[in-house]
Amino acid sequence: MKTENDIAALISQQLDRLLGAQVDVDTRKSVETGQFDDVLWRDCQDLGFAAALVPEGAGGVGLTWAEIYPSLMVLGKHAAPVPLGETMVANRLLQDAGLDLVQGAIATGFDLLSLTDDNLVNGMARGVTWAPVCPHVIVLAQRDGQVYLCLMQTADLTLGAIDTLSREPAADITCNGVAPVAMAALGPDFTERTLLAHFAVLYSAQIAGAIGFMLPLCVEYANDRVQFGRPIAKFQAIQHTLAQLASEAAASQAAAIFACGKADAGAVEYGAMVAMARAGRAATLSAEIAHQVFGAIGFTDEHSLHYYTRRLWQWRSCTKSDHWWSEQLGDTLITAGGDALWPSIVAA
């Protein structure tokens, strides 16, 4: 009998094969010009990936965050040109709120909007990645201190296309008295930071997957690139930078695994604080090191490296910066008091 871990491993392997077969430089170029890969998305959805975090009783696969972590790493490994991870998390939030799942990709706005007495949403959500190509968007809206999760149809919204670091489709979305497709009141502990935290866990795992892909890429290039009569990997300075890149890859993976475990334990915000404080820093340093190793070739349109580094820059910042998450973590630890610091470290 297969265990849940076996099923999780099979799912991540299947996703790895699918993305490996269908994603290349041309695919990534296409999505950056606003073209959505309907075939790849349909294959992902047909295989159940979009509902992987949703319980089986609600029509999903029923995996935990810890079990889906390898698949989130795979998304980062391939710099997946579809919003699969975002849709996984959005579907989980819809299910947790007691709302029905929807077909198709889902984008998420992180700004808190307002809700009228007639249940109409007003306000702007800035920098919503994938919004131009998703049929639905989820947002938080507040009325009289109560926060609601609102599912909106993108066709009902006003979209102002913007440029992002990753060049993936994105927009500022404006709601002018728009009725949600569905909405649900959230518990008193669910805030804007809670929403950010769910996606910070996702992006920390994707950062880990991308850095894990870049590491052997850099090692291989350093062994192949000859300068002054020998491979640049023979130079001590290059060896030091590659060793640092390996440590950043390991640290980002540990941070993401920690965050997924905390999400399963009901402490998603604490997990996100720790993970993004470390993974965001790893994203910055790893992109810098990779481009130092590759030199000018890594910036050329034909090379794959910049597709990863630009996504690292995007993922480290779209749910606030690593500095912001570090401040949140510091405030949390200070509030808990000095006596709680060491137990919180050893408990992790």
Image (cartoon, helix red, strand yellow):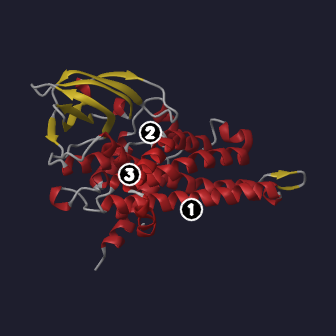
The alpha-carbon separation of the residues under discs 2 and 3 comes to 21 Å
- Position of residue 236 measured from the top left corner of the image (x, y, whole percent): 81, 58
Q: Is residue 298 among the parts visible in the rendering?
A: yes
Q: How many other residues sit within 10 Å of disc 2, few (<14), some (14-19) or many (≥20)?
A: some
- Three-letter amino acid code at the position of disc 2: Lys
Q: Is residue 204 visible?
A: no
Question: Would you call the spot at circle 3 few (<14 residues within 10 Å), some (14-19), or many (20 or more)?
Answer: few
Q: Is residue 153 left or right of residue 172?
A: left
As drawn, the label of residue 250 is 1
Q: Amino acid at mark 1?
A: Ala
Q: Is residue 129 left or right of residue 305?
A: left
> What label does residue 335 carry, if any?
3
> Which is nearer the eye, 152 or 284?
284
Relative side of 102 to 127, left or right: left
Q: Are marks 3 and 1 in contact (CB under 8 Å)?
A: no
301 up-or-down from 326: above or below: above
Q: Residue at x 56, y 62 (%)?
A: 250
The numbered mark, 3 or 1, whose residue comes first in the sequence reads: 1
Q: Quadrant of the N terminus?
A: bottom left
Amino acid at pointer 3? Thr
Left or right: 348, with 268 as reference point: right
Q: Which element is circle 1 on?
A: helix
Q: Which residue is mark 2?
A: 320
At numbered mark 2, what does the secondary structure look like: helix, strand or loop?
loop
- The mark nearer the N terminus, 2 or 1, is 1
Furthest residue in direction bottom, as rendered:
1
Labels 3, 1: front one:
3
Q: Earlier in the sequence, mark 2 or mark 3?
A: 2
Identify whether 287 is placed above or below 77.
above
Q: Residue at x 38, y 51 (%)?
A: 335
